[in-house]
Image (cartoon, helix red, strand yellow):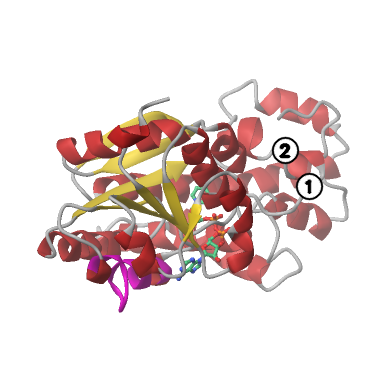
Amino acid sequence: MMESGNMERVGYIGLGVMGTPMSSNLLKKGFEVTVFDIDQSKVPPLVELGASSAGSVAEVSENSDIVITMLPGSPQVTDVVSGSGGIIESGRPGMIVLDTSTIYPKDTDALAEAAEAAGMIFVDAAVGGLPPQAISGTSLFMVGGEAEDVERVRPLLEAMGDTIIHCGPAGTGIRCKVVNNFLTMITAKANAEAFSMAMKAGLPADTIWQVVTGTTATNGCLTTGWLSKMFSGDLEPGFAMRLARKDLSLGIRLADELGVDTPLADLALDHYDELLGSKYADKDFSAIVSAACEAVGVEDPVLDRRRP
Ligand code: NAD
């Protein structure tokens, strides 16, 4: 553990499914962390681990050298960073705003500009991996920022993850994330169609899982993300359906701005919209398979041999 006197003071805003385990890892690695969430019930577990609790975003800024945001999407991040009483208004020159949320990339650009205009530094470090990786400190970070600023945040990222990819200047990390999740959400829909067909054909779930994960058909939903979720019969959100829909729409918007056609993604987005109007709206995104199975009258492909 480093000497606490040498460490930057960290602010952490957004203690949800990801923010709680990630800030816990900072505390366990000896960082001084001040936390805030509009939902006060999220705070006590972090205070038990040694965090200081702030009553507002401004109070977080006043007590931090680097403020991390891990919030649902663009409206919340924009409000917390550049809104009234936000980090930029209440912060100091030289402070770093480290956004790890998944938001609209042009909003990232605007926040980076606003931070720079205030003499502050913006680094985007979107997160690859799901809650199990956030808990075990093995998240992947895709980082956009100047090299020296990325070095300043690296000790924090290393406390929360095991793979840190410096993608380029501010805004490149979030663009990598949007491209990544665009692919994941389309893949999820393809998995749903394939597994519902397999179950309807009467194939044992373990058998079809073993086949497709042993060939080029394999993908990370099947081999990591969904093993502790739908494949274990657990549909409670790790990565929520509404976040999956948000991320796919961010990808379509980015592609549209770049003049890239996305016919597959457009179809998939319609399907996510349907799911948000169904009983699967508040479930994990792996419930996309459950919806497809239900539609053809078969059980979910719960595996006998589940993995963590
Ligand atoms: P979440 O909804 O569980 O957590 C968000 C937290 O932010 C909540 O505790 C909420 O109370 C808090 N919040 C909302 N508005 C706030 C405000 N104005 N001020 C302070 N706190 C506020 O979401 P999550 O699953 O932790 O995801 C957070 C971000 O990380 C999203 O952008 C998501 O797309 C991204 N992400 C999620 C996962 C995942 O597997 N869940 C993985 C990678 C990236």
Q: Pointer 2: what residue?
A: 228
Query: Which residue is at 73% across, 23% downward?
Result: 210
* Above/below status of 205 relative to 96: above
Q: Quadrant of the C terminus?
A: top right
Between residues 61 and 260, which one lies in front from this camera angle?
A: 61
Residue 199 quadrant? top right
**Element under disc 2:** loop
Verify whether residue 86 appears in magenta: yes
Residue type beneath disc 1: Asp
Residue 86 quadrant? bottom left
Which is nearer the N-term, disc 2 or disc 1? 2
Query: Which residue is at 70% across, 59% downward?
Result: 283
Q: Pointer 1: what residue?
A: 234
Residue 270: image x %, image y %? Answer: 56, 67
Is the CB atom of the residue marked by disc 2 within 8 angstroms of ligand 1's nearest atom? Answer: no
Looking at the rendering, the stretch of residues picked out in magenta corresponds to: 76-88
Residue type beneath disc 2: Ser
Q: Main secondary structure of the magenta part?
A: helix
